[in-house]
């Protein structure tokens, strides 16, 4: 099911009023923020390249309060329908959602902010909430770049069905990699799990489920060195860190699940970042720049979970509302 596009408001010729808030991103943090912003009657614009963000890539979500089980895409749809209902009711709420466009820069203009997009649109607002999430990290090893999209992928739920009855590998040892293994093992012929660490770093219940699978081989303490293939992935070179042994594994596909890089570039010039390039926030979601707030995986909040991102988005807007109140 495709998401609909919405009317795009334009701040041009100084005729339109300055917005109270621009929310950048429409993952769990951004959509939760949109709901709370509408309840506070803030004149709000949400700008996003897509709907759902990383949530769409989760094959199975079993720990979101109120839902026993659903796919990440289905959960994103639930979020979206809630926001869409608010967006459609313009008589009651002042919220607009712009899709298929992305913010490229946030600049400060006196007490306000100028937000520019890839399509050349410019908007002015009194406050900004950065909820841009993160993007997958890559291994940056020989052969990888040319094989991305040709056997090398970062999304198990997106591309998993293409590898039915194939031999594949999942790189990583955190929650996202374990979720990918459990999902892919249902359709793949055989799954190698390549983990550079000695043990999994994630939920114990996921690791226990993987241990039960008969078509999965764990390669702990193993580093991925190189990828090879003519036009498509054919094999990868791995090295056991303990023994030093190197070998080539013949594969049809590889799924990289080694973490994410925060999408903080849009405001990196005006807010403080930590060594992970996350936007540093305090307990009130405030950044180092007054009027700019952050929530979700792009921020320095340590735990990256859907429910935490949604809660952070709501909390951020409550703080923004207080910030915008006349002093």
Image (spheres, helix red, strand yellow):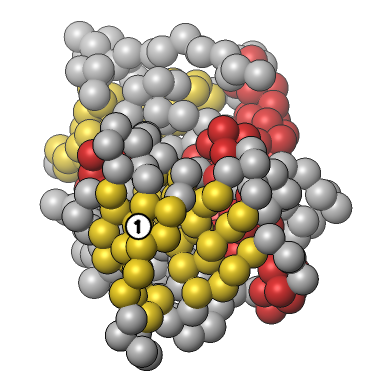
Q: Toward the viewer: 74 or 211?
A: 211
* Lateral position of residue 85 relative to residue 312, left or right: right
Q: Is residue 221 above or below residue 145?
A: below
Q: Toward the viewer: 197 or 37?
A: 197
State the residue at coordinates (69%, 44%).
187
* Lateral position of residue 133 relative to residue 227, left or right: right
Q: Toward the viewer: 40 or 105?
A: 105
Q: Quadrant of the N terminus?
A: top right
State the residue at coordinates (42%, 60%).
249
Q: Is residue 101 above or below residue 213?
A: above
The residue to which callout 1 is attached is 236
| Residue 57 % position (x, y) | 56, 43
Residue 102 seen from this side:
yes
| Residue 247 % position (x, y) | 35, 69
| Residue 221 % position (x, y) | 42, 82
* Lateral position of residue 77 relative to residue 234, left or right: right
State the residue at coordinates (35%, 57%).
236
* Lateral position of residue 299 relative to residue 157, left or right: left
- Which SS class for mark 1? strand
Residue 129 seen from this side:
no
How many numbered badges does the structure rendering display?
Answer: 1
| Residue 82 % position (x, y) | 70, 30
State the residue at coordinates (41%, 40%).
151
Q: Residues within 10 Å of mark 1 (few under 14, many from 20)?
A: many
Q: State which quadrant residue 218 falls in.
A: bottom right
Q: Is residue 158 above or below residue 84?
A: below
Q: Toward the viewer: 314 or 186?
A: 186
């Amino acid at each position: 099911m495709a998401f609909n596009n919405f009317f795009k408001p334009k701040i041009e010729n100084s005729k339109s009023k300055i917005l109270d808030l621009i929310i950048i991103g429409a993952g769990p943090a951004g959509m939760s923020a949109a709901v709370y912003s509408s309840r506070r009657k803030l004149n709000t614009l949400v700008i996003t390249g897509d709907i759902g963000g990383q949530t769409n890539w989760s094959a199975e979500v079993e720990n979101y309060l109120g839902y026993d089980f659903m796919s990440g895409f289905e959960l994103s749809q639930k979020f979206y329908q809630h926001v869409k209902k608010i967006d459609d009711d313009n008589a009651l709420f002042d919220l607009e959602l712009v899709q298929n466009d992305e913010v490229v820069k946030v600049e400060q203009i006196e007490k306000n902010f100028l937000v520019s997009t890839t399509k050349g649109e410019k908007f002015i607002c009194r406050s900004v909430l950065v909820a841009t999430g993160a993007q997958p990290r890559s291994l940056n090893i020989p052969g990888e770049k040319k094989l991305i999209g040709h056997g090398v992928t970062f999304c198990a739920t997106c591309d998993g069905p293409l590898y039915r009855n194939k031999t594949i590998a999942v790189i990583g040892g955190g929650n996202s990699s374990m979720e990918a293994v459990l999902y892919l093992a249902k359709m793949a012929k055989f799954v190698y799990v390549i983990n550079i660490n000695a043990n999994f770093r994630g939920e114990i219940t996921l690791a226990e489920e993987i241990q039960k699978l008969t078509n999965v081989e764990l390669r702990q303490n193993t580093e991925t060195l190189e990828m090879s293939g003519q036009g498509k992935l054919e094999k990868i070179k791995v090295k056991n860190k303990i023994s030093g042994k190197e070998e080539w594994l013949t594969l049809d596909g590889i799924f990289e699940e080694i973490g994410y890089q925060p999408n903080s570039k849009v405001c990196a010039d005006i807010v403080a970042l930590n060594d992970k390039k996350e936007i540093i926030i305090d307990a009130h979601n405030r950044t180092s720049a007054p009027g700019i707030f952050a929530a979700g995986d792009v921020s320095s909040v340590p735990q990256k979970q859907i429910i935490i991102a949604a809660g952070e988005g709501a909390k951020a807007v409550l703080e923004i509302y207080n910030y915008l109140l006349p002093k």
